[in-house]
C-alpha cells in the first residue's frame, strides 16, 4: 500500500467519523453555501489537472503537486471540524497550570508581548515571520515536487496528518483561554476573535465562515516549525540553514505574536517526537511509500 492511499484512507475515515459525530452533536454550524460551491469547483479542477497529467501527458512533478495539494486541502477542513467538535467537550481551562510552568522558567509573557507592541519595527518583523507558517506548506509541496523528491514530501504530509489530531486531542482535554485572559491584558484583534470563537464553541455554536484558530496548547506553529526543520534536514545548506533560522524565529514569535504561554511551546516538543516515531513506524511497515 502506498502513502497516498493511506492518506486518502485517513481522510475518508475522519470524514465518516465527523459526519457521525455531527449527526448526534448539539453543535450548530453556520456556513456560506457559496464557499462550499467554490471548494467543490476547485477540487473538480484539481481532479481534471491530475487526470490530464496522469493519463495523457505524464509528469511526475505535476502529479505530485496536485496530489499533495489535494490531500492538504481535503484534510485541513476536517481537522478544523475535529477541533470545533472537541471544543464542545467544555473541559476546564488549564491556564493556571500553564502560567505556573512559565513562572518556573521565569518567563512572564505580558512583558514580552508589550515590549514588541512598544517596538513597532520588531513587531512587524516577527509578525511577518509568524505568518510564514501558512506559506511554508505550498513552498514545501512545490520545492519537493519540482525536485521529484516524492518520498520526503509524502513523509512530510504524513507527519502533518499525525501531528494535527494529536495536537487537537491535547487542546480538547487541556484547553486554555490564553495568557491575555489569565493576565488580563488586551490581545490582538485576531486573538480576541479566536477567543470569541472558542467561547462560542463551548456554547455549541460556530460560524465557520469567520473562524480563527482555537488551539492554544500545544502551539501548533511550534509543532510544525520543528517538522519543517526536520523535513529539510538533508537538503543543501543554502536551503536548510534559512529554513532552520526562519523556523527557530517562528517558534520564538509564538510568544509575542501568537501570544502563547511558554508552556505551549514546550508541549510542542513531545508532540513532535511522538509524531516522528509514529510516522517512522508506518514508513518502515509500508513497502512502497510513494
Image (cartoon, rainbow, N blue to C red):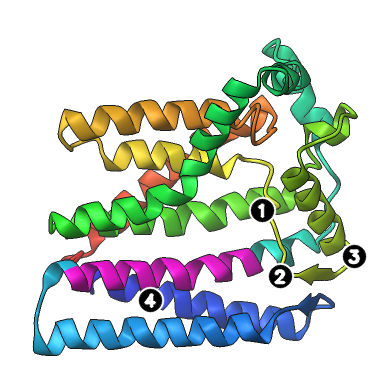
Q: Which is nearer the N-term, disc 3 or disc 1?
A: 3
Q: Which is nearer the N-term, disc 4 or disc 1?
A: 4
* Camera-side mark, 2 or 3: 2
Rendered image: mark on residue 8? 4
Q: CA distance from mark 1 to mark 2?
A: 11 Å
Q: Which is nearer the N-term, disc 3 or disc 4?
A: 4
- Magenta span has 191? no
Q: Which is nearer the N-term, disc 1 or disc 2?
A: 2
Q: Which residue is mark 1?
A: 213
Q: Is residue 89 above or below residue 246?
A: below
Of all residues, the one furthest to the top in this rendering is 106
Q: Which is nearer the N-term, disc 2 or disc 3?
A: 3
* Camera-side mark, 3 or 1: 1
Q: Name the residue rendered at 42%, 36% in the picture.
A: 226
Image location (x, y in percent) of residue 198: 80, 55
Report the magenta stretch's main SS: helix
Amino acid at each position: 500500500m502506498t502513502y497516498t492511499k493511506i492518506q486518502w484512507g485517513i481522510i475518508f475515515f475522519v470524514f465518516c467519523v465527523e459526519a457521525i459525530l455531527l449527526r448526534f452533536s448539539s453543535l450548530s454550524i453556520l456556513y456560506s453555501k457559496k464557499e462550499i460551491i467554490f471548494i467543490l469547483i476547485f477540487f473538480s479542477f484539481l481532479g481534471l489537472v491530475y487526470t490530464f497529467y496522469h493519463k495523457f501527458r505524464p509528469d511526475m512533478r505535476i502529479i505530485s503537486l496536485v496530489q499533495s495539494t489535494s490531500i492538504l486541502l481535503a484534510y485541513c477542513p476536517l481537522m478544523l471540524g475535529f477541533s470545533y467538535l472537541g471544543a464542545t467537550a467544555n473541559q476546564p481551562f488549564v491556564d493556571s497550570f500553564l502560567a505556573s510552568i512559565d513562572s518556573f522558567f521565569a518567563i512572564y509573557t505580558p512583558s514580552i508581548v508589550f515590549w514588541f507592541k512598544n517596538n513597532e519595527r520588531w513587531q512587524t518583523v516577527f509578525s511577518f515571520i509568524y505568518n510564514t507558517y501558512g506559506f511554508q506548506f505550498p513552498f514545501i509541496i512545490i520545492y519537493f515536487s519540482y525536485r521529484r523528491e516524492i518520498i520526503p514530501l509524502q513523509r512530510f504530509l504524513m507527519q502533518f496528518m499525525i501531528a494535527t489530531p494529536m495536537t487537537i486531542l491535547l487542546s480538547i482535554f487541556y484547553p486554555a483561554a490564553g495568557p491575555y485572559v489569565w493576565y488580563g491584558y488586551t490581545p490582538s484583534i485576531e486573538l480576541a476573535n479566536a477567543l470569541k470563537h472558542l467561547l462560542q464553541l463551548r456554547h455549541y455554536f460556530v460560524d465557520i465562515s469567520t473562524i480563527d484558530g482555537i488551539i492554544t496548547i500545544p502551539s501548533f506553529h511550534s509543532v510544525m516549525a520543528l517538522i519543517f526543520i526536520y523535513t529539510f534536514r538533508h537538503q543543501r545548506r543554502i536551503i536548510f540553514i534559512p529554513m532552520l533560522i526562519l523556523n527557530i524565529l517562528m517558534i520564538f514569535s509564538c510568544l509575542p505574536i501568537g501570544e502563547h504561554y511558554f508552556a505551549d511551546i514546550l508541549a510542542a516538543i513531545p508532540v513532535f517526537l511522538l509524531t516522528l516515531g509514529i510516522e517512522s513506524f508506518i514508513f518502515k511497515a509500508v513497502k512502497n511509500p510513494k
